[in-house]
Image: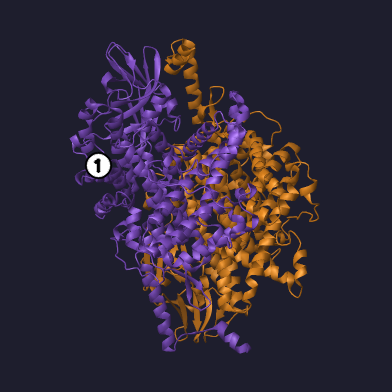
Chain colours: A purple, B orange
Amino acid sequence: MVDAAVRTSQKTEGTSPRIDVKRVEDLLLGTWADTRRTAREMIKDSAFWRDDSLGKDDHRERVLSQLHLLVQNKAVHRAFPKRFGGEENNGANISGFEELVAADPSLQIKAGVQWGLFGSAVLQLGTQEHHDKWLPGIMDLSITGAFAMTEIGHGSDVAAVGTTATFDAETDEFIINTPFRGATKEYLGNAALHGIAATVFAQLITNGVNHGVHCFYVPLRGEDGNDLPGIGREDDGLKGGLNGIDNGRLSFDHVRVPRTNLLNKYGDVDENGVYTSSIDSPGRRFFTMLGTLVQGRVSLDGAASWGSALGLYIAITYATQRRQFDGADGQEVVLLDYGKHQRRLLPRLATTYAQIFAHDEFLQKFDGVFSGRTDTPDDREDLETLAAALKPLSTWHALDTLQEAREACGGAGFMFENRLVGLRQDLDIYVTFEGDNNVLLQLVGKRLLTDFAKQFKDKDAAALAKYAVGQTAGKVFHGAGLRRFGQNIADFGSTARSVENGLRAEQQHELLADRVQQMVADIAGRLRPAGKDKVLGEKLFNENQADLIEAARAHGELLQWEAFTDAVNSIPDEDTRQVLTWLRDLFGLQLIEKHLAWHIINGRLSTQRAAAVSSYIDRLCLRLRPHALDLVNAFGYEPEHVRAPIASGIEQQRQDEARAYYADLEASGEAPVSEKALKKAAKK
Amino acid sequence: MVDAAVRTSQKTEGTSPRIDVKRVEDLLLGTWADTRRTAREMIKDSAFWRDDSLGKDDHRERVLSQLHLLVQNKAVHRAFPKRFGGEENNGANISGFEELVAADPSLQIKAGVQWGLFGSAVLQLGTQEHHDKWLPGIMDLSITGAFAMTEIGHGSDVAAVGTTATFDAETDEFIINTPFRGATKEYLGNAALHGIAATVFAQLITNGVNHGVHCFYVPLRGEDGNDLPGIGREDDGLKGGLNGIDNGRLSFDHVRVPRTNLLNKYGDVDENGVYTSSIDSPGRRFFTMLGTLVQGRVSLDGAASWGSALGLYIAITYATQRRQFDGADGQEVVLLDYGKHQRRLLPRLATTYAQIFAHDEFLQKFDGVFSGRTDTPDDREDLETLAAALKPLSTWHALDTLQEAREACGGAGFMFENRLVGLRQDLDIYVTFEGDNNVLLQLVGKRLLTDFAKQFKDKDAAALAKYAVGQTAGKVFHGAGLRRFGQNIADFGSTARSVENGLRAEQQHELLADRVQQMVADIAGRLRPAGKDKVLGEKLFNENQADLIEAARAHGELLQWEAFTDAVNSIPDEDTRQVLTWLRDLFGLQLIEKHLAWHIINGRLSTQRAAAVSSYIDRLCLRLRPHALDLVNAFGYEPEHVRAPIASGIEQQRQDEARAYYADLEASGEAPVSEKALKKAAKK
């Protein structure tokens, strides 16, 4: 294990054009770059680092102590009200929070549980009394809490949780109860050990009516440190990753809490048990409540993207130093000079750039809504759709990238000290928590179908054909600065002179946008026969479920492509813009390559042009190869963030030493002759 | 953690046709089914199980003690000579060894290091003197050893290792030396702690000539238990998985061993330092030596396939019990009834079947060569190509499958006790050890190119067009029982009446075989301009590297498809054959779907037929859905092998309990009315 981060001086091969690394770093760090830099500076302190030598129990205690360090460093107050010493700065809060992933994802997620979920529930779903009573303690960590939403039997389907909160007018209390084992709250951070309270989601029942899921503040432990009567706690034990967090189960055996422990911003019960709400529709009320907790998804999108960046920094740095097999000149070739190695790492680098740029737009949108600047029901709905579209893509990408990075580093990638396996293990759960990725994408798909249907309400079938390219895309970025490209592009198939000309930005956009739109239209058409027939509707939906999820994914990819393009267009420096345009092209073309059959079958690409996509990607990889180090250096990570020995320069030293050894041996005249060479010479 | 395996009685939904589960199990367990059953019976003993509560150090000691248990159970002697109490039964040896993966992959791989690598090096590369001296101790574990081939600077490129073994005629010794840090032996099991000896691969230098890499038996520790002079040992510490193995580094500072410690079967040095070998060509000699160690790849192919099977058993069992979201009938739907969930798990089940069947053919081939029954240089070359083609596919598939299985189980999949994350972490390294997967596939690709070139030696270009479909495929299975389909199939595009008719076995085979052949021919054509120009050759090869690897993969997939088809055709029971034919079709069609663009661009599929492939896959999934449980039960795993609480029936109990609770509540007349229902009623 490496004791401390080693500072390295990486040399980038001389080349022209060269990107302005510092400028690209600014662009990547985005709107809240200052906060990100503050957070990165803070976590240079090794006290924040993951200590791989610790077992689960010690790791949990270390992370708890790191949470206290975060409090001391004033790193967790940004989103809270100013009257409690906060900043009410939501964008900055998420930005700073995301950066913790480089220190230890367990630290990030445990902080997320405490302040982003448990604290946010009190803040967003509670009212002033709750804020006054609990927020100060939550902020300073004297009240540690669990966020008790998921149940063993209900993950993504929160509306169906089994836990009940029944009002008892006689005592003016709610009775929180777990009626069967499947209703046990499960996978909750802080539940196994550290939580002394929880925000519990339960069916609110009063006067014989179930008003749906609401959130309750439930103390778990008394002053004496013992669990209160009726509280059941189990430890989830070892997990695939994030073992610095004490996940566990909570069950409630008729636990009584005061009526006022209902976090009553969106629904309240008076002392007579009469229920009132500012939102009449139970469905809309439920989604409004859940929507206030969207920030978890926002932050996972960012943390996963930066996790990918870190993995690529390590693998690409190593790939520019490690050599394997002789080249034509008899010297061993650097890994990144192999075509396959470029193909493995560079398209993933392009995707990571796209995701980081898209994330910044997303964060701006989030900040607009939560600051109240652009907070309409439409904005909130757009924000949630955006979260549901982007979080799945970036979290899956992180796992894919970290795995490819680990494989690209061979056995060295498997060593825990080189970070890649640990990051992957920790980020694994990101793809199913805060909403299972497939379920989230299905939500996006349904939204796309709804939007599509709205377009054609009271219109005839001919309207379908006119449905504008790019209509779907860009929409949810409304107000967040993303532009749409012009839609009247001449038929490029016949006029373009070269493949590259025929696969430039406009054509990439048209292909990507067209696919989303056509897929949605096709699915809508296939679902139409169901009409109001529920059984047929379920059957047809089920038959189209995989396609709908794929359409949602295509929608998210389009948004990322647009964000990347906007970022590229904002660059004044020509060289930098050129290189980043290649990178954006690589992102766009690999998406097109992935779905090449679709584009051909649907008449969007001729087979000739389709056949050229892959070789164009190869050319882009070759063109980007000399910039690979610059592009990962622009992530702005310092040795204290990277901490992987293989990316510290140690491999370069070993290679230099080996080459020097052989050169010296050769010069000494004492080098053994190879039998092979002797045999060859003898033949002549 | 679950204390003991819970026996469960799984019910499969009534359906017709039904497969004969027992018969399919026999088919899957293959040629050495008896040995597999013996091994599975042995590891029912919890002493063999992975204990997730142990940290790295304790885990290492537990696995070492399990190795002693293997000795006691006579589970490790099958491959060794009869005169030492072995059975000289290579196929059985690998079969039994593979099954250990279900107990603990660390146990499997540490056993592999000791007997499959270290022991095999002595057996295969040494001669009688070495056998007599060391094999008994290796077999009974009194000599624990490391297999020191890989270096920090040289993984897959073994020929270029830096370690030297220089003969000193004065003392009749070899001097083993690590001349620079990059030549340190790395990632070696048994090197950190337990190994008292090592088989070390080094450049054999005598009389100023380097005869290439040879293997030497090097004691590491003296009688006193201390490392001998010049031996350097470092601990690799924590890894991404397999932490029950003490991987580490070894370096040698002019360590002297007797001349006779050269394992001299393929090359020897006499007391005057004169080198002799039965194989004249240094290149062929090197590959012959390495070829004797192919069994590692053989066993990884099997272990990975069975690891996938175990993961699918868990995820599919859970998916038939866990419910989420209401269906049209108001009841929550079982996960596996969702179209997307079927799409996620069933094609992977089909692939796992294909791999298990292909593995048995592979194992027969291996056994034929190593028993001497079918041991020609061609057989050996075919065997190595087969290993290089199949090991990458099955090991990557295992990671992909275990990940999808874990995600399909949601948060429960992330709990260590449910096995999926642990298996994935342990199997991660399988994709880069015993030959990096990409490097192995490249070897296959080169072999395909060589075979292709041989076809056209002295022939004109027109011969190319006649190159028979399936020529490449099947070849390496020569003698192993695989048949090729007839090649004169009528043009199905015009005659087939339905999509299904047009995508049956013969067409699947034609599409898959055609693709391999065409890709190889295309690559060969693109490489041709290089001629003897080394620099251009390197450039062109690099440009085609990714394609060549893809062609090799397609070749491996074709072999798997053929093995699956042969297995299906061997089934007498009609119902069983029908269901397995669907499963084989699913395997074939998903391969075609994955490369759909290729088949269209190259004129193999019309766009209409191509468009139908995906919906045919959906229909196959639906058709196979009722057989999913039968198909995973046919893997033959018992509760002691599975040990995952979510696959124990506990979820079914929870679901039954929840449904009973709601039914009782309804019957009691005291169920709360939902606000939603009230509002709906009020509107009417």
Q: Position of residue B16 (x, y in %)?
A: 70, 31
Q: Position of residue A373 (x, y in %)?
A: 30, 37
Image side of residue B650 versus residue B347, left or right: left
Q: Is A375 or B479 nearer to us in this picture?
A: A375
Residue at disc 1, secondary structure: loop
> Where does the N terminus of chain A fall, quadrant-wise?
bottom left
Three-letter residue code for mark 1: Arg
Q: Is A379 or B58 nearer to us in this picture?
A: A379
Image side of residue A81 versus residue B305, left or right: left
Q: Position of residue A471 (x, y in %)?
A: 50, 41
Q: Is residue A420 above or below residue A185?
A: below
Please indicate, yes or no, whether residue A364 appears anywhere in the rendered image.
Answer: yes
Residue indicated by mark 1? A78
Q: Where is residue A155 in the image (x, y as percent from the top left)?
A: 44, 32
Q: In this view, does A540 lie above or below B208?
A: above
> Where does the C terminus of chain A fall, quadrant-wise?
bottom right
Q: Label 1: chain? A: A
Image side of residue B449 versus residue A240, left or right: right
Please indicate, yes or no, whether residue B86 appears anywhere in the rendered image.
Answer: no
The answer to which quarter of the image holds residue B371 is bottom right
Q: Is residue B292 above or below residue A477?
A: below
Residue at x 23%, y 34% (from the top left corner):
A143
Q: Is B208 or A193 nearer to us in this picture?
A: A193
Task: Rate crowding at label 1 as few (under 14), some (14 to 19) or many (20 or more) other CA atoms within 10 Å.
Answer: many
Residue at x 68%, y 30% (from the top left corner):
B15
